[in-house]
Amino acid sequence: MAIEQKITCDVCGAERKEANHWWMGEAGNSFSSPKFHEWDDILVATSIHICGEECAHAAISAWFCQRMDARVGAGRTRDETV
């Protein structure tokens, strides 16, 4: 009996079906930007799962917000970080 792994979008929670064309990503941190690449079953456990363009935009937006918050937290104003 094969074990099926349920995979969901890390942004919206949609469940991946066999025919979906999803993307995978490496979450950016305060020093690196997020990176997206085509689906690879080998990297499922170590990547973020993105179901489409809208969720990719949301993930990038969240990264920008975290980066701006980190800069503001370091004593800069939002105007100084641009």
Image (spheres, helix red, strand yellow):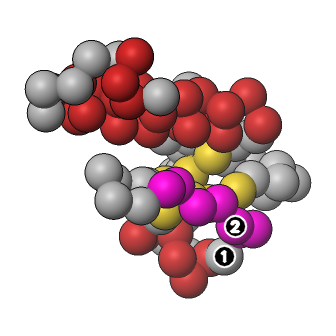
Helix, strand or loop for disc 2: strand
- Circle 1 SS class: loop
Q: Are marks 1 and 2 in contact (CB under 8 Å)?
A: yes
Q: Quadrant of residue 54?
A: top right
**Segment tinted magenta in the rendering:** 33-39
The kind of residue tagged 1 is: Asp
Query: Which amino acid lies under the numbered mark 2 shown in the image of this protein?
Result: His
Q: Quadrant of residue 14?
A: top right
Image coordinates of residue 4 in percent, x first then y, are 54, 64
Residue at point 51% right, 69% down? Answer: 44
Residue 76 magenta-highlighted: no
Which residue bears the numbered disc 1? 40
Residue in view at x 27 percent, y 17 percent: 77
Q: Which residue is mark 2?
A: 37
Q: Closer to the camera, 38 or 69? A: 69
| Left or right of residue 71, residue 51 in this image | right
